[in-house]
Image: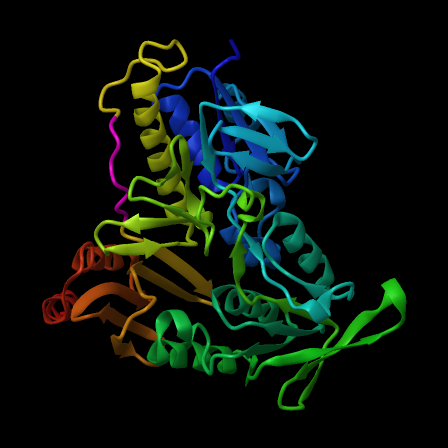
Amino acid sequence: MSPRRIAVVGASAAGLAAAEALRRFGWTGTLTLVGDEPHPPYDRPPLSKQLLQGAWQPDKLHLRAAEQLDALGLDLRLGTRATGLDTATRTLTLDGGERLACDGVIVATGVAARTLPAAAGLDGVHTLRTLDDALALKERLSGTGHRLVVVGNGVLGCEAAAVARELGHEVTLVGREALPMARTVGTEIGELLAAEHRERGVQLRTAAVDGFEADGDGPARHVSAVRLADGTRLPADTVLVAIGSEPAVGWLHGDPALDTTDGLRCDAYCAAAPGVYAAGDVARWQHPVHGRHLRVEHRMNATEQGMAAARNLLAELEETLPGDEALAPAAGRERRPFTPVPYFWSDQYGLKLQAYGVLSGADRSETTVLDPDARKAVALYGSDGQATGVLAIGVPPRQVRGLRALIATPVPWEEAREGLHNARA
């Protein structure tokens, strides 16, 4: 009989959290962790901040020391890409053609950076998703006086623009949205961010990108300008394309049992199919409290969902592997719905944004600017008469954590609004 095996596909925060939880919750069988990058698990939020800024070196991003990974007893496959999954037999195929029979699989493959077709093969045009991406951009921005155009004014684009400006580069931030991060945080918070970026010297443009201009021929072609749809030409020697991401589900398309529309669709327990679970940026699961499928690309969610998927997978396997030595007895191993309060943060210059709950899809929001000069503000977001999210800028962390209780579950708008007012008093 083949040894019992669980495979975790994806060796970032969600995958590592799942692997650690599987061991902690009692899995003693083979535990394969597959990562397509050659690096050990590392943290991604600092890529666009501390690493790009030069404050951190790559080894500080490692999520665990080598001895901590060794203690997990992993069958660690770094630099290896999963190419297929047969959910009926729970067989995982790797890029070398190896096929792994698994008792369970956790998909934590995250997302891939979107880019523009016109950027293909053009030197000086970067994306920023992986450690290698960040190191390449950091090297490109060494020295001062570069002309950087950031295409995309979402969270990543704004963070990178802030760092590049602090490094002394000429920065233009281009986005389809009229205000930075407006799609996520709304107009009023977007206006505060726009004012901060302008004051710091970033040029803001609202436009679609029509293409790029380049010097040289063939592989030596280097970007020299960004063309906007309105005819404007923005000179640039470096371009960062930060126009969002796509769930890394291409390798799953061959299995008709899986719904890979905007991520891997899961139930409330993070299960995509019997014995197959998902966690992190790639998972689109049914949030029981909000009553709809959510896919959350935030760091804390990755860890929490990795642990939840591991616990629920083992609870399922306990029914099919009773008494098997690969699954040590453990108390409290039952499937539970995954019901987090989403949280994200962003650092731009000296500003720290922190948000709890669900901001996207809000049909109303209300912002109170507490100090316009310090860009200090709080905002409430909601839909269908319920408050679902809260955001704060420049507010002490302890006070922000206190706001979490306001929207831990959707509550009537006026009730949350009054609670926010009392919290500020």
Q: Is residue 47 left or right of residue 38?
A: left
Image quarter of the C terminus: bottom left
Residue located at (62% from left, 48% from top) = 131
- Magenta segment's dominant SS is loop
**Where residue 54 appears, x then y in whole percent?**
62, 55
Residue lying farthest right?
A: 217
Residue lying farthest bottom?
A: 231
Say whether residue 196 is visible: yes
**Where residue 13 appears, x then y in whole percent?**
47, 41
Q: Which residues are magenta?
A: 334-340
Splitting the image into 4 quarters, where does residue 181 fall?
bottom left
Q: Give above or below for 111 relative to 154.
A: above
Query: Which residue is more in the foreground, 191 or 109?
Result: 109
**Where residue 271 appears, x then y in whole percent?**
36, 38
Query: Which residue is more in the foreground, 126 or 332?
Result: 332
Does 86 appear in magenta? no
Q: Is residue 199 left or right of residue 392?
A: right
Residue located at (29% from left, 13% from top) = 329
Does 338 appear in magenta? yes
**Where residue 394 appears, x then y in whole percent?**
33, 67
Q: Is residue 386 left or right of residue 48?
A: left
Residue located at (37% from left, 31% from top) = 310
Report the label total: 0
